[in-house]
Amino acid sequence: MITAATAAWRPEGFEGEAAVKIGALVAAYGLDAPFLRVYVGEDAVFAIMDGDAVLWGDSDEARLFLTMDPAVRRVRTDEKNALRLADVWQAEAVCGSVMTPAVSMTRSEEVEALTPREYWEVISPVFADSLPPFDAWYTDVSHRVRHGLCRLVGIREGGKPVAAAMTTAEDGDRLLIGAVATLPDYRGRGYAGKLVTTLAAMGQEQNKTVLLSPKNEGAERLYARCGFAVCGRYGQVER
């Protein structure tokens, strides 16, 4: 049976990209936030916020619940769940690899902390078509930064941020690296690799599980050269 999550909401084996994303939402906002709903079933956990859902586990009941909720527009989950939901919704699932460090990572001295506004200066021209409005993004990211649940790093040239990466999801045990961007005029200089290895090293220093979800095969090859190895598959589907 699907029920609202309570204090003991984490099931055994709660691992992987979807688990990090759900854990990060709960760590940042708790189970009582009116805009965040977290549910558990016998074999699944899922969270819904602002029309976006994250699903962990293999459960027909959970997939049916998400299908019947008209507020859910997009689901991030593993490849198997995404393909099943895509079949029901007659939509296309976008799938890719999840990676984790296979070696000890090293920080780059070129990488510095960025403020949310500095970070936005880099990602807004790169991800312009997929970003939420600035005010919503800034409110969420600033909140998580204040609570030690988000790290924003970048590389500057001439004092200006030209490349950036962040932990898009983070809780006490794990972190997920994403939103890696380099301004077009500064690509090909190895900045993406330096950013992700630095964030990975930060996580390893705290004994956190580190995950990374490349946006395409080219990024996957880059991160493999940096010492990351494939450990799973993610999937995303929109109605």
Image (cartoon, rainbow, N blue to C red):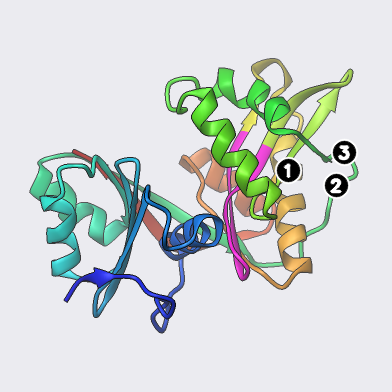
- Which of 190/172 is in front? 172
The numbered dot on residue 195 is 1
At label 3, the amino acid type is: Glu
Residue furthest bottom in the image: 12
Relative side of 85 to 97, left or right: left
Tell me the amino acid under the disc marked 1: Leu
Instruction: Name which of mark 1 and mark 2 comes first in the sequence.
Output: 2
- Residue 36 lies, in percent from the top left, at 38, 52
Could you tell me the amino acid type at mark 2? Ser
What residue span does the magenta drawing correspond to? 165-180
Q: Are marks 1 and 2 in contact (CB under 8 Å)?
A: yes
Can I make out residue 55 in this image? no
- Residue that mark 3 sits on: 110
Report the front residue among 71 and 186: 71
Q: What residue is pinned by disc 2? A: 108
Q: Write the residue at 21% across / 42% down.
A: 71
Q: Quadrant of the N terminus?
A: bottom left
Dot 2 lies on which element?
A: loop
For image coordinates 70% across by 57% down, the residue present is 200
Q: Using a 10 Å C-alpha cutoff, classify the residue at mark 2 as few (fewer than 14 neighbours), some (14 to 19) or many (20 or more).
A: some
Label 1, label 2: how many angstroms apart (C-alpha)? 8 Å
Q: Are marks 2 and 3 in contact (CB under 8 Å)?
A: yes
